Image: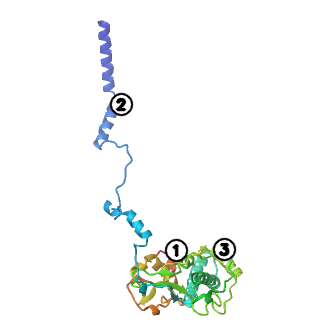
Amino acid sequence: MTSNSEALAKKADEATVTINSPERSQAKAQKTQVHSHGRPQTERPTEPLSKLKQISSSIADSPIGNPLVINSAQAEGQLGVFYDRSNTTRMPTLITLNVNNIRSSVRRLLRDVIYENIVTQREQDVATMQASALHLSNIIARGVCVMLYMKLRIVNYHDYRVAGHYRKKPKVPTPFEVPQPYALAISQLGMLKLSGEVQELFLSPTIPDGADINFCLEAAEAWSPVQYSTALEQAKKLGLRTSTVDLTVKMGSSWWLYRPVSEGDTFALECPWNEENFTANTAVLATLFCNNATGGFNNPIVTLDQLGDKNVGTMLYGMTNLMSRNTYYAVSDESTFGYKIGI
């Protein structure tokens, strides 16, 4: 009995010492302090959504109608937009491009772009840098015009009305590259079927009479693939990005059909047909050719008088004459000068 009593008394003393120890009191105080700020969280905190998402109904995402019936009707030619035979056409309407205005706009824009790249990389006097930019831009612009001719040659080669314009084939370097923005524009230059019209209408771009003699170049200009390759390599070292063009695609977009208009110091692009034929991307691409030889905006590259003066709205209303350079840097993704689309 005595030994058991002593053992129990000893355990009680140890428990008392443990409960009343300073370490236990400090831990209890810390625990109390933590609980005063809330229970500790072990999961990773997440930030609230900064943007609200539009609530969409699951009904809108579900297909409407019977897909099997729709596919069957499309395969049998019973579903779609159909024209009366009197409103159909077998031949596209030829739209003549203004090659002179296209050539002058390419020269002007390339001269400004190359000059700005020379200024950022070389320490020369202004006159020397301007002369270098003028020399390179003139040669590279010839390559853009030749590429334009080659694309239109593919588009209209089998059209008996203008086949005589495209019998000659120029000698070009391999690979044949042009500045990236013009490669994108030329790749989307081709035949276009208009939507939303009462009559079926196909438009096909072509060159005027006599432009084929020198591949859309001026009569006094000489095309040299070797000279072009040398100038293009110099431009690449300055930072210009180049690309090839897929010449096998005959269909194109509507970027070449806009009608430029000016109101004071601001400009816009008129849509001569229904708005479903035009997009913001094609309007931005059209601004590559809006500046004329003097830097002004009014530079029509196509004549649409034969189809009337219809105007269903405008695109890019209120832009300035700097839009061409903005588009060039945005399309080629050259952010050196901070140009963005729409500035």
Q: Secondary structure at mark 1?
A: helix
Q: Amino acid at mark 2?
A: Glu
Looking at the image, which residue sits at the far front?
A: 76
Tell me: residue 305, above or below residue 121: below
Q: Amino acid at mark 3?
A: Pro
Give the residue pinned by disc 1. Answer: 331
Tell me what residue is drawn at x 37 percent, y 85 percent.
312
Sequence-wise, the earlier of marks 3 and 1 is 3
Q: What is the quadrant of the N terminus in the image?
A: top left
Give the residue pinned by disc 3. Answer: 175
Left or right of 115? Residue 339 is left
**Quadrant in the rendering for residue 7:** top left
Query: 195 or 233, which is in the foreground?
Result: 195
Residue 120 placement (x, y as % from top left): 59, 75
Tell me: residue 299, above or below residue 185: below
**Quadrant in the rendering for residue 69:** bottom left
Tell me what residue is drawn at x 52 percent, y 84 percent.
204
